Every structure is written in structure tokens, then in C-alpha cells.
Image: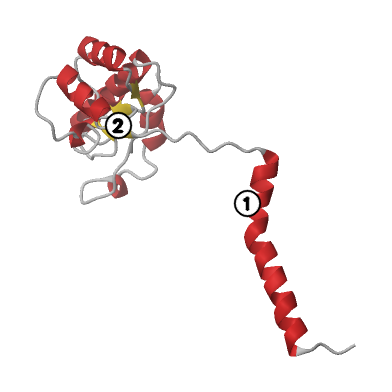
Amino acid sequence: MTTTRRSFIRNAAIITAGAALAPHLLAAQSGSKKRALKKAMMWDTIGYKGTVMEKCRAVKAAGFDGIEPSSHMNQDEVVKAMDETGLKAASVCCSTHWKQTLSHPEEAVREQGLEGVKQAIRDAKRRVLSGMLGPLHRAGPQGDSALRGNGREDRDRKCLE
């Protein structure tokens, strides 16, 4: 059986069209729903000047579903503003982790960092979050390399005590 140029082009077009339409047809058949993506804004990136309540109202009016408040804020004020506006806390940003790292060579700075992370965890619990995201260690001129393998795991465990 020989294939003519015309039949080859026809068959190639049919296969290409089928491959292009298959995902759409399969999605329509399975009844899959579109994911409900929600948008949140990091607190320190809100360019609006005002109180916590005013900022939350502005974020909500801009179409966001949540905020990522910084740790060490007035908890009562933040929770009240979130309740009134309907915003949710996407996560909590530990406001001390860049300067007071848990891998800093000075013990006093590591202790400040540890207290900062513990406060961020308390703040996350207050906002009914199941977790917190933030780097516990930062490499740099005074960072991780000096303490690698030297108590790092113990400092990580202290955050969760």
C-alpha cells in the first residue's frame, strides 16, 4: 500500500487536530472544576498609608482575598481588621529573620532570632494558620558557613518548643 502526498497531509491534519482538541474534550467530559486561586498581599508591600484597618480595607477593595501580616504586629488590631474585612491570613512573615538569623556566629543574635521565630509562630497560631514559611538560616559573610553542622539542628528544634 502506497501513501500519496494528499492522504499523508489529510491524515497528519486529522491527527494534529485530534491531539489539539483531546485535552479540552477530556476536561469537559470529566467535569473538572477550575481551581479557585486566591490572591494575598504581603503586609510590608502595601503602599497605602493608614491604620491596619484602613490598609485591610484598601487591600480588599483592590480585589485581594488575604494578607500576609508581619509578625510582631498588634494581634488584636490585625485580627479585628481581618474579621471586619473578610480577609484571611495566607501566612505570617517573620519580621526578624533577615538580621537576627539562627545561623549568626554571635550567640546573642541567634537568641534574638529564635525569639523572633517563636513570636512569628505564636502570631500564626493566633490567626489560625497551620504553618509559617521563612528561612531559618541565611548564608552570607557572617552566616551559615561558620556554623554548618554545629548545633544547627538543635536551634531549628528550639523554634518548635
Res 24 label: 1
What residue do we see at 19% from left, 33% from top?
44
Which quarter of the figure has residue 158?
top left
Task: Residue 154: give x, y in percent of width and height.
Answer: 40, 30
Point out the tag, 1 or 2, that comes first from the N-terminus: 1
Q: Which residue is mark 2?
A: 63
Q: Relative to 38, say whether 57 is above or below.
A: above
- Where does the image place residue 4, in percent across and percent down from the top left? 78, 89
Q: Distance of mark 1 from mark 2, alpha carbons?
A: 29 Å
As rendered, which of 48 and 151 lies closer to the eye? 48
Q: Nearer the viewer, residue 149 or 116?
A: 116
Left or right position of 35 against 142 = right
Residue at figure coordinates x 23%, y 9% from the top left: 76
Q: Residue at 73%, 89% (x, y): give it.
A: 5
In the rendered view, does 153 fall on the left or right side of 30? left
Q: Could you tell me if residue 69 is visible in this image?
A: no
Residue 134 vs 10, above or below: the answer is above
**Residue occupying the point 28% across, 33% down:** 41
Is residue 6 visible in the rendered image? The answer is: yes
Question: Crowding at label 2, few (<14), some or many (≥20) Cα neighbours within 10 Å?
Answer: few
Name the foreground residue: 36 vs 145.
36
